[in-house]
Image (spheres, rainbow, N blue to C red):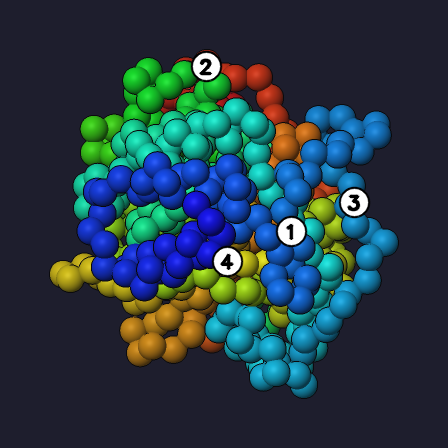
Amino acid sequence: MKPQAHILAGAIALIFGGALAPGASAASADEAAALKTTLTPLGAEKAGNKDGSIPAWDGVYSKVAAGYKAGDARPDPFAAEKPVLSISAKNVDQHAARLSAATVAMLKKYPAYRVDVYPTHRTGGAPGWVYDNTFRNATHAKTTDGGYGVEGAFGGTPFPIPKNGYEAIWNHRLAWTGETATYATRTWIVTPDGKRSLANEAEQTLMRPYYFKENSVEKSEGMYQFGRLITRAPASKAGEGILAHDGLNEKAPRALWQYLVGQRRVRRAPSVAYDTPDSVTSGIGFFDEAFMMFGPIDHHELKLIGKKEMYIPYNNNRAAAARIADLVGPQFLNPDLVRWELHRVWEVEATLAPGKRHVVAKRRYYLDEDTWQIILTDGYDAQGQIWRSNYTLTLLAPDLPALLGSVMWGTYNVQTGAYLLNAASNELPIQYKAIARLPASHFGPEELANQGSR
């Protein structure tokens, strides 16, 4: 397919993408062929933008620093760079078209808040075998269950050429972030009056059977991820645990358990979902905001709006290595330590489904085109006012290789002034660390109780 023809096909897909019924195969063989030419292997535009401020993609960043050991804080490969643009309340209107609504609101609310934009580095990507699986998925994957399930996909991005919002969101859920990993994590909350406190310290373990390299669609049992969190501090919460089994469709539905020390028993926890206040974040966040998206989202309908250039947090290894006292300020994260870059993003709008309820009536998800991960989310209240900003700072992990959006994520409550930073390994002994595959029993309810009772 010639580049001009591909661009035209993409434009048509964007115009009608929100109206396409979920369930159809995402791409034809001709469309998938672009993954070998004008598109990256995961479906991003390979070329840069017109003025060169977004460069061409030339492969995933995989230059592991000399002396790096698994679990260490990863150094910042771009530490010597300076901002090319600084956005504040003084010039926000000039740059608003490339900012999320919540970022604009933050800039207007706080005169000292700032977005420092650095040179763009397209570091996202995955190993070659993930690219091979993605190419196959492009013509075989399809959504099920009204868009809330997926089948025919394995080991790569399911819909590298998406036709609707459901497919784009599945790309986020199944984005490459490694296979099995563990990390120490802390949750920091800041109250509207600027007081910072530690809400949670925990051990997080993730395993993703969807990326078991030797498996296949036929061998898959339908679970794409297992996750376990064991709280170690503060003392009042030590031993609490959450266990999640995330499935691809109704044949392998999601299962979730919670262990509470006071009850000394493991219980199914269907309420750990949607807009239930997140106990890990002391209620500042909602459970479905965790990791940028956690659990079912079938209370909203999803529409693919299109693609745009946007300033988003990116390659934030400096922030990941900073002292918490320096990073987590009284009203917002220290702008001196947060790196923003210009990237192309896919925009997905979520609106309340008929007959459903959710306190966040509308969301706008912004997905990085190179990794398919949600980097920013705008959340609106029932009156249509901007309310919440969900963000992830993204950590560059050349050893995987991957750009991680599942760490250093948080929420700004634009209306009240409270905010949080979660999944932060700053000043802890283990940053996100790839480990050997774990036995299935590690993610069983019985082991959750054993860990919690220690």
Which numbered disc, 1 or 2, marks the residue that appears first in the sequence? 1
> What is the C-alpha distance between the residues marked 2 and 3?
32 Å
| SS at badge 1 | loop
Disc 4 and disc 1 in contact, CB within 8 angstroms: no
Which numbered disc, 2 or 3, marks the residue that appears first in the sequence? 3
Residue 120 lies, in percent from the top left, at: 69, 56
Residue 315 lies, in percent from the top left, at: 67, 50
Residue drawn at x 85%, y 54% as measured from the top left: 80
User: Local crowd at mark 4 within 10 Å, few (<14), some, or many (≥20)?
Assistant: many
Which numbered disc, 4 or 1, marks the residue that appears first in the sequence? 1
Which numbered disc, 2 or 4, marks the residue that appears first in the sequence? 2
Read off the residue under disc 2: 214
Residue 363 lies, in percent from the top left, at: 37, 64
> Residue 56, which numbered label?
1
| SS at badge 3 | loop
Read off the residue under disc 3: 77
Which numbered disc, 4 or 3, marks the residue that appears first in the sequence? 3
User: Local crowd at mark 2 within 10 Å, few (<14), some, or many (≥20)?
Assistant: few
> What is the C-alpha distance between the residues marked 2 and 4?
32 Å
Q: Nearer the viewer, mark 1 or mark 2?
A: 1
Most extreme residue toward the left, as rendered?
355
Q: Quadrant of the N terminus?
A: top left
Read off the residue under disc 4: 345
Q: Amino acid at mark 2?
A: Glu
Residue drawn at x 37%, y 19% as measured from the top left: 216
On screen, residue 338 versus residue 34, left or right, reads right
